[in-house]
């Protein structure tokens, strides 16, 4: 069971799971043995709106950290997300085909995107940030958004 | 002005008795009155109709947008919306509910009817959630859709 940091910005509450690492762009990476489960943060799912479709690269695709992993079409935007780690895509979330709204409903749980067999976790993890750092980064991003 | 805000305007002018003239910010002009049951005139624009119409038109436009985003092949959309007015004990009045009754026809377009209907329902939820007007009113919003998926 994940624990969360929580912050309120304007009238919105955002949660950040403490058991995983993050890219500043709002992709999380959770190490499970030599595999890394990947998903989007609560902030990203709220920022982009209700998800209509998610297009993931096919199983077997090899990634370098920073390669495009997924394109997400929401009611308001089409956005790309990039892999936080290097490795081979070995599993995609089967629920996303018919129920992509799980990303909105449970971004840190049932709304995961994919699992990558990590090629060099120790190298990649050095470029990721922990929950506390992501929370601060996300807060500054959200505050900038509000000032636009 | 912040890029997160926008302003819309209308102008009204009293034309004597229970008549007014309305100029919409987007161009059209209407004579208006109150409804006959509120000391107004039949056959013209009223604030009550305008309130219900604002919600109905806004939700429809948002549904059309949502249908495009959800890649639905929309064949037709028609929606009667009823606003329920309550006269309070102190004689103030409020629209307590807006009931939307959309009739929606969508082509299956090679997908199963269940999958398409689920997407239509999500598009309807999104239309309500993202409609500026529906999101701004304090009336309860009820949606009673009739959805037909055609081969």
Image (cartoon, coloured by chain):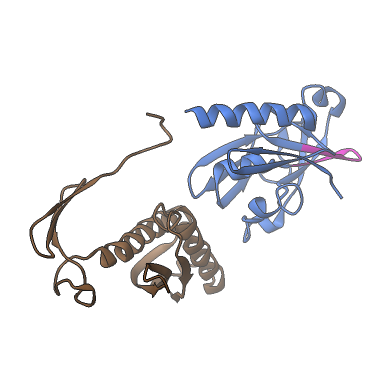
Chain colours: A blue, B brown
- A137 up-or-down from B105: above or below: above
Q: Position of residue B105 (x, y in %)?
A: 39, 72
Residue B147, quarter of picture: bottom left
Q: Residue furthest right?
A: A33
**What residue span does the magenta drawing correspond to?**
A29-38
Q: Residue at x 28, y 67 (%)?
A: B48
Q: Main secondary structure of the magenta part?
A: strand
Tell me if I can see residue B47 in this picture: yes
Residue in front for this viewpoint, B86 or A53: B86
Residue in front for this viewpoint, B81 or B61: B81
Question: In screen coordinates, is B144 left or right of A129?
Answer: left
Question: In screen coordinates, is B127 left or right of A70?
Answer: left
Q: Position of residue B82 (x, y in %)?
A: 36, 74
Q: Is residue B73 magenta?
A: no
Question: In screen coordinates, is A93 left or right of B118?
Answer: right
Tell me if I can see residue B150 in this picture: no
Q: Position of residue A16 (x, y in %)?
A: 75, 39
Q: Residue furthest left?
A: B16
Q: Residue furthest front?
A: B90
- B65 up-or-down from B5: above or below: below
Q: Residue at x 63, y 26 (%)?
A: A140
Residue A88, quarter of picture: top right
Residue in front for this viewpoint, A137 or B87: B87
Residue in front for this viewpoint, B28 or A114: B28
Q: Position of residue B93 (x, y in %)?
A: 37, 68
- A7 up-or-down from B58: above or below: above
Residue B34, quarter of picture: bottom left
Q: Residue at x 45, y 74 (%)?
A: B145
């Amino acid at each position: 069971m994940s624990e969360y940091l929580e912050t309120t910005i304007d009238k919105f509450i955002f949660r950040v799971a403490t058991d995983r690492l993050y890219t500043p762009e709002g992709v999380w990476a959770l190490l499970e043995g030599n595999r890394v489960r990947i998903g989007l943060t609560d902030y990203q799912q709220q920022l982009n709106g209700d998800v209509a479709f998610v297009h993931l690269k096919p199983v077997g695709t090899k990634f370098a950290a920073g390669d495009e992993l997924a394109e997400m079409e929401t009611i308001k935007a089409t956005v790309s997300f990039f892999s936080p780690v290097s490795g081979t895509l070995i599993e995609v979330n089967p629920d996303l085909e018919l129920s992509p709204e799980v990303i909105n409903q449970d971004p840190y749980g049932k709304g995961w995107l994919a699992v990558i067999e990590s090629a060099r976790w120790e190298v990649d993890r050095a470029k990721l940030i922990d929950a506390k750092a992501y929370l601060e980064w996300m807060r500054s991003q959200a505050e900038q958004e509000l000032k636009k | 002005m912040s890029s997160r805000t926008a302003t819309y305007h209308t102008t009204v002018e009293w034309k004597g008795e229970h008549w007014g003239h309305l100029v919409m910010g987007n161009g059209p002009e209407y004579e208006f009155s109150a409804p006959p049951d509120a000391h107004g005139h039949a056959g013209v624009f009223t604030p009550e109709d305008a309130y219900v119409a604002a919600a109905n038109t806004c939700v429809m436009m948002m549904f059309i947008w949502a249908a495009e985003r959800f890649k639905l092949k929309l064949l037709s959309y028609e929606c009667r919306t009823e606003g329920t007015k309550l006269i309070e004990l102190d004689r103030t009045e409020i629209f307590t509910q807006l009931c939307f009754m959309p009739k929606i026809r969508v082509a299956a377009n090679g997908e199963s009817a269940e999958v398409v209907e689920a997407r239509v329902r999500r598009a309807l939820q999104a239309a309500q959630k993202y409609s500026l007007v529906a999101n701004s009113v304090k009336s309860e919003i009820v949606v009673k859709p009739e959805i037909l998926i055609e081969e």
